[in-house]
């Protein structure tokens, strides 16, 4: 059975471009890889993916919440939005019901992976996350293979990235002697980047420094997504960047990101298959953890 590569965009900070990057990456993966199929899973009760694709559907009918709460099959709640792209909506406020219902259920952090286990129609699954670290975030981290941490170029987002790294690190710690897989951090993605602003450059430099010092959970620093009004305009038009503005800066940057991600995954797979013993997650000693950034 073909298993898709599962990539989640996750950050404990609102408004950093998680949703825009989920959709931008899914779009670019489809464009860069003709014939491949991509599934977007919206795991955020805000249901912004639904808005971006203008999906007219009563959320109570299904979505991820129904997969998690009612045992619905993911294939039965998917919506086809483009020839290469399907979407599973979040189920909106029912996502909160999931948090409440399973707050004390043993192994509740593994429900998503178990429910999605037999999904074989896709080459890539791209997951949008809420701006919080909750039960659904734990589910995302044990289901996904790889994590991309979006960050806008400001200090509070940097704090959000660091909190997210600690959260993932603690999940690796909790599950280290078990069979539960925990996703690897693939890299940090700065969004809404403007190279004319010193603060933007200094934040990316600091991320590079953190990655060089193994303080990003093994993740690299991806080429940033430039700030581009076309992102907002495409969303208002309910179009993908590849449809509305294929030559825009942001469309180009997301295609670069999609290539960098596929390359990075290939490199990790090669390392895994080589005789070298690779650390899936570089765990810095507590006193070596991410220093305060200069920004
Ligand atoms: N590269 C970009 N250039 C300009 N605007 C952008 C860019 N990326 C995202 N935006 C805009 O920034 C805002 C926040 O983006 P988005 O909703 O994707 O963030 P988010 O992290 O998903 O937020 P939340 O935490 O609320 O889910 C949106 O209005 C979006 O259109
Ligand atoms: Mg969002």
Image (cartoon, rainbow, N blue to C red):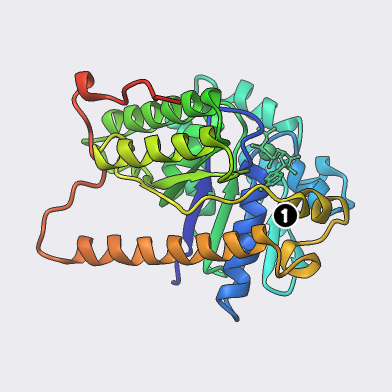
Q: Is mark 1 on a helix, strand or loop?
A: helix
Q: Give the x, y percent position of residue 187.
A: 41, 47
In-image side of 76 versus 113 (left or right): right
In-image side of 205 versus 88 (left or right): left
Residue for badge 1: 77
Q: Give the x, y percent position of residue 164.
A: 45, 30
Task: Give above or below for 236 relative to 289.
Answer: below
Residue 115 visible to an observer of this rendering: yes
| Residue under the image location 61 percent in, 25 percent down | 99
In-image side of 102 versus 283 (left or right): right
Q: Is 71 or 47 nearer to us in this picture?
A: 47
Looking at the figure, which quarter contains the N terminus? bottom left
| Residue under the image location 77 percent in, 65 percent down | 245
Residue 73 visible to an observer of this rendering: no
- Residue 78 lies in quadrant: bottom right
| Residue under the image location 67 percent in, 72 percent down | 84
Q: Give the x, y percent position of residue 192.
A: 63, 43
């Amino acid at each position: 059975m073909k298993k898709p590569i599962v990539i989640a965009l996750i950050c404990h900070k609102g408004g950093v471009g998680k949703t825009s990057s989920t959709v931008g990456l899914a779009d670019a993966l489809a464009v860069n890889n003709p014939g491949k199929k991509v599934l977007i899973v919206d795991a955020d009760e805000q249901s912004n993916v639904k808005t971006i694709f203008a999906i007219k559907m009563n959320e109570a009918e299904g979505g991820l919440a129904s997969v998690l709460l009612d045992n619905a099959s993911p294939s039965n709640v998917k919506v086809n939005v483009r020839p290469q792209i399907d979407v599973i909506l979040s189920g909106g406020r029912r996502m909160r019901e999931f948090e409440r219902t399973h707050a004390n259920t043993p192994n509740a952090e593994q429900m998503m992976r178990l429910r999605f286990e037999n999904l074989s129609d896709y080459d890539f699954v791209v997951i949008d996350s809420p701006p919080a670290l909750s039960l659904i975030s734990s589910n995302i981290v044990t289901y996904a293979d790889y994590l991309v941490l979006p960050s806008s170029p400001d200090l509070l987002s940097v704090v959000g990235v660091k909190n997210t790294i600690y959260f993932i690190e603690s999940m690796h710690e909790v599950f280290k002697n078990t069979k539960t897989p925990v996703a690897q951090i693939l890299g940090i993605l700065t969004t809404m980047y403007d190279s004319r602003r010193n603060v933007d450059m200094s934040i990316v430099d600091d991320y590079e420094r953190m990655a060089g010092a193994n303080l990003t959970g093994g993740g690299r620093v991806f080429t940033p997504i430039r700030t581009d009004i076309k992102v907002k305009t495409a969303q208002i038009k309910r179009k993908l960047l590849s449809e509305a503005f294929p030559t825009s800066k942001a469309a180009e940057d997301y295609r670069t990101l999609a290539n960098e991600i596929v390359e990075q995954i290939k490199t990790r797979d090669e390392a895994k298959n080589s005789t070298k013993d690779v650390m899936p997650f570089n765990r810095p000693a507590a006193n070596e953890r991410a220093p305060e950034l200069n920004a």
